[in-house]
Amino acid sequence: MGAFSIWHWIILLAIIGGIAVIVRKSRSARATDNTDPTKGNSELEGIGGWLVVLLVLQTLGILNIVLSAHLNFKGYDGLWDVPNISFVIFTDVAMNIVQLALGLTVLWAGLNKKRFFVDLFFYQWLLTPVLFILGLAIAGSLLGGGFSDLLTVGELRELFPQVFFGGLWVWYTRASVRVKNTMVN
């Protein structure tokens, strides 16, 4: 093990800072007019409850994307001699950038209580299996292997919980009174 570098400190501060921003937003003063009958249950309003958990998980998911992209990039060191591997690597990097950009946009929309947060969160959930299948298809077609050659049990063990629990969070964002009352901008 090496020394604790400046990058480790930056990542640690980003994690703590992201969670602190979410908690601070959840503790901010709520609207004083709770008598508006069109808002429904006005007690369930603002970033709090399960919505805080969702936004903290969204922050950790963004950090997971960055970490997995870094680990993937380290794994590409000895592969540059393989034919067509450069396109596969650049496609993987592009898919990570798309996933990161959408994740940051979803987090921004959630923290700023944007109305389109619910739709963006759904698209982000839908993007996970689409990018997985697209990555397998591109790698399989360019490297000469099929799905069975590239698909491992470990990858499926990672994909299925993401899709299942992501689907539960999508259901929560669609059914929650708190989300409906909070995402009004």
Image: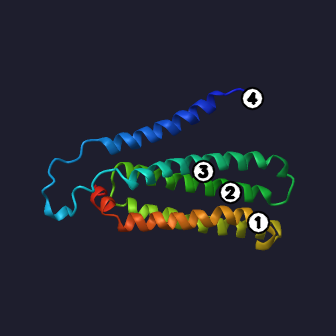
Q: In this view, does 42 lie to the left or right of 169?
A: left
Q: Is residue 27 left or right of residue 99?
A: left
- Secondary structure under badge 4? loop
Q: Which of marks 2 and 4 is nearer the N terminus?
A: 4
Q: Which of marks 4 and 1 is nearer the N terminus?
A: 4
**Distance between the Cα atoms at labels 1 and 2?**
17 Å
Q: Residues within 10 Å of mark 3 (few under 14, many from 20)?
A: some
Q: Which residue in the rendered view is the most extreme toward the right?
A: 81
**Distance between the Cα atoms at labels 4 and 3?**
23 Å
Q: How crowded is mark 2: few (under 14 residues within 10 Å), some or many (20 or more)?
A: many
Q: Residues within 10 Å of mark 1 (few under 14, many from 20)?
A: few
Residue beneath disc 1: 152
Q: Quadrant of residue 12?
A: top right
- Secondary structure under badge 1? loop
- Secondary structure under badge 3? helix
Residue drawn at (40%, 44%) of the image: 22
Q: Is residue 88 left or right of residue 57?
A: right
Q: Nearer the viewer, mark 4 or mark 3?
A: 4
Residue beneath disc 2: 92
Instruction: Tell me if label 1 and label 3 are in contact, CB under 8 Å.
Output: no
Q: Is residue 50 above or below residue 74?
A: below
> Which amino acid is tagged 4?
Gly
Residue beneath disc 3: 65
Q: In which quarter of the image is residue 144?
A: bottom right
